[in-house]
Amino acid sequence: MPIPSSAPSGRRVLAVCMAAGFTTLLDQSVLNIAISDVRDALHADSGQIAWIVAGYSLAFGLALVPGGRLGDVRGRKWLFVTGLAVFTAVGTLAGTAQSAWMLVAARLLQGAGAGLVNAQMIGTLQDVFTGTRRARALGLYVLTGGLSAALGPPLGGLILAAAGPELGWRLTLLLSAPFGLITLVLAVRWLPPPRPSARHSELDGVGLVLVGVLTLLVMLPFIRPPGMLGGAAFAAGALTVALLFAGWQRRYARSGRHPLVHPALARSRPYALGTTVAMAQFGTSIAWSLVQTMFLRDGLGLSALAASAVALPAALAMAATSSQAGRVVQRYGQRAVTAGLALSCTALLAGGLAALWVPAGPLPFVLAGTQLLQGVSTGLIVAPNQAFVLRHAPAEAAGVAGGILQMSQRIAAAVGVSAVSGIYLRGSTAGVAGHRTAYWHATAACVVVASLAVLISLVAAARARTVDVAAVTPAPGSAVEKPRV
């Protein structure tokens, strides 16, 4: 039976989950501000930089679903503790890495540990809380993730300013160690004992492998070394694997088992469309944040502290907007999410055009203004869109809907970082003018994706209204149908 959320144990569980979410999600965002120093210290090329950043998201996303299934079978507490221990220990290895590939490997392992932790966190919140309190707990989890992403760059800038570039980037990676150790102790003490919620739980291993291969085939064209196969070959391979995945999912479902993507989720158009919106928003947000940091530091020559100050308005705006997002959505519904996406497009476009035309002196202030708009848009999009997606998840797939949503976002982040950073790094080789043009091209790619997200959000809202009307409209000939006159 769920633990009453009003009990002290419920509040302690929530505190542990928020601390773990903050620690694992801060770890990625705080590295962005130091990525130029990592590149210089380890002599990393553009492909290695993409793997250092995108590999974490990829491993994180792929670990979510199997981690959730294992938690159903084995209980969540010790898997939570194991994942957090791996995350913390490997974070120490990352902070002491002596080569770029060593750091890539550490980030992949750390991402897998973070994915395992977050899978148990979502399940634990669902086990412990019920009704509206569960929705609030999950909303706090989403808000914690958004705030950690926004606060990461300013915090990283302070560390680099205090410790210098060589030691500073290592400290940004080691930052997770004290937070992880404290959370680990609290998890052992406060999380409820492991209680399996299912006697058996299938894992669609083939489906998971196919998703991983498909993601890699989409990523590699942007980060492949010279002389490797061309983009057409990767596109053909990705299409083949996508068709294989779709066929496998249908076959697995017909056999009576539960595929990686539950058929009911694919049939729910509002869920599928809302998840696509979440993928577009998360992927472009992570990718743009990284590219803007590289542009500020490499293109404009700003210090880490100055570059982090440009990102600070986003954190403040998101915190302020998120606190009011619930009221806005209650009044305007899915239109608030669409408005947030449109605002994000505006911020992206304004930042890209400013990089082309605004002189170097005032440019950081202009970009700080676009960050302010981006923070407002994120507050309007993230938690409200998740609530929309999960509200339209079919009842028979409610248990896996959140995991699939998170996995999709993380995979989108891996692809987005690879693509957008690849566009920027390949073009930023001709002085300041080259950096400006490369930043515009990378931002334009984000604008295209964000614009598509606006259109998809409009369709999702229309589909949701159709579903809601159908749910309350009596069928012809039913007992509640009004008699014809």
Image: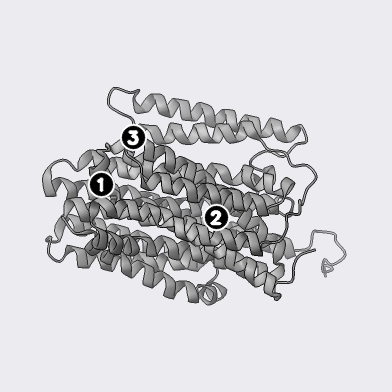
Give the labeled residue for mark 3: 223
Residue 361 in the image: state x and y as whole percent. Answer: 12, 64
Q: Earlier in the sequence, mark 3 or mark 1?
A: 3
Marks 2 and 3, the one that precedes in the sequence:
3
How crowded pointer 2 is (Cα within 10 Å; few <14, some 14-19, many 20+) is rated as: many
Quarter that holds the C terminus: bottom right
**Quick check: 33 left or right of 130?**
left
Amino acid type at mark 3: Ile
For disc 3, the neighbor class at 10 Å (few under 14, some 14 to 19, many from 20) is many
How far is mark 3 from mark 1, CA to CA? 16 Å
Per the image, label 2 sits on a secondary structure element best described as helix
Asked whether the residues under the numbered discs 3 and 1 touch, taking CB atoms below 8 Å apart as contact, a structural biologist would say no
Q: Nearer the viewer, residue 391 or 46?
A: 46
The local secondary structure at tag 1 comes to: helix
Q: Amino acid at mark 1?
A: His
Q: Is residue 483 left or right of residue 152?
A: right
Please give the label number shown on residue 441.
Answer: 1
Residue 274, numbered circle: 2
Q: Is residue 247 left or right of residue 112?
A: right
Labelled pair 2, 3 in contact (Cβ < 8 Å): no
Pick the residue in front: 109 or 203: 109
- Please give the name of the residue rendered at 74% of the width and 64% of the height, measured from the top-left corner: 473
